[in-house]
Image: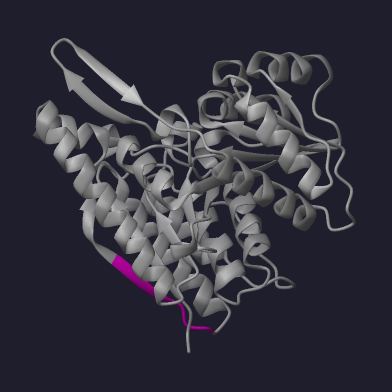
Amino acid sequence: MEPVIGLAVGRGTGPELAAVFERVLARIADVYSVGIGVARSERVYHSYSSLKADAGIDRVRELTREDADHYAEFCRTRAALGIPAIFRTAINAQSLYLVRRHLQAVKVDVITAPDASLLLVRDGAQGFYTGENTHVPGALIRTMAFSREITEKVIAFAVRRARQEWPDGGVDEIVMAYKFHLLDGALDEWVAESAARHGVEIRLFQPDTVNRNLIERGPRPRTVIIAGNEWADIMHVVLLDRFGAERQENRCTENVYLHPDVAGLVEYQTVHGSADDLEGKNAVNPVATVRAAAMIAERHGGCGGAVRMVERGLATLGRRDIGTPDLGGRHSTTAVVDTLLDVLEPEGQPVLVADS
């Protein structure tokens, strides 16, 4: 039976990028002579801009909750059917983080520098980003929670993922970046217990201390950072700029759900947002979506080597100066994707590099 991948689409440039994803996934499947099905959510989810354009505060809250409930149920249903992965375009952050709290998500990114590899595990299941809003006259009250259970799940996942990333067992440092001084010593205790349970050393730091250490000495060769989203969201682009080799707009990343209802379900997304200002202009950068399609095809569609194949194709586009305006190019989204699909070839076969 052919594998099936879930697809969830938000407003803004979401429909354009969903079309890119389906085209690239179909082309990779064709190259490998396999079938990969796509199960699309029937709801198109709001971006923040589309919410603000359509509604006032009360309606925004209602639509936010509706989107969150619908998407969470879509994830549960896909997981129950044995679907291993979902590609999602950008949606409104408040809806997204309500889902991440309920389904206990962690976001995973590997940032590779010439002399180091940084595994960033972002805690999307608790903290300020996952809070709920209560409105009273003239004020908004945001409440959130931290728990021993979720902290243990996040740490356990990070340790497992580090051992997968470096199967010889070598991890030089595990640090956690949380504003733990605000939590009455509870996080310190939970982290110490979890570290002992997993037989690892975990150093819990304030975010500014992690920043200073990274600035002064950089990451050690194999570093794991487990971080609250309040720090990781701000610092991600800085980490890419200082230690990575790729700009944020070109990257995809993965969210892994830890709740038993959806355990093992992996959601892939572009790092960039919904780019509502580019909606309908055929100008959105497709590179992150292309990379997500390749990663999904390789990991979940039986297309070994698909990531390398797509990277070879993207390198060909770079040599031919084919790119969207945000990358200094002059080509449309469609033109970039058309050219990429034309040059995709299995490993071992030449990729044409003639000028266009």
Q: Residue at x 37, y 62 (%)?
A: 75
Image position of 253 with respect to 92: above or below: below
Q: In the rendered view, does 168 fall on the left or right side of 14?
A: right
Q: In the rendered view, does 178 fall on the left or right side of 102?
A: right
- Front residue of this view, candidates 17 and 283: 17
Q: In the rendered view, does 325 fall on the left or right side of 202?
A: left
Q: Position of residue 213 (x, y in %)?
A: 78, 17
Q: Residue at x 76, y 58 (%)?
A: 164
- Front residue of this view, candidates 151 and 344: 151
Instruction: Find residue 215 and report its image quarter.
Output: top right
Q: Residue at x 71, y 70 (%)?
A: 347
Image position of 138 with respect to 195: above or below: above
Instruction: Find residue 228 and report its image quarter.
Output: top right
Image position of 22 with respect to 106: above or below: below
Q: For residue 320, say whether it is visible.
A: no
Q: Which residues are magenta?
A: 34-40
Q: How many marks?
A: 0
Q: Position of residue 26 (x, y in %)?
A: 44, 72
Q: Position of residue 122 (x, y in %)?
A: 58, 38
* Structure colour scheme: one colour
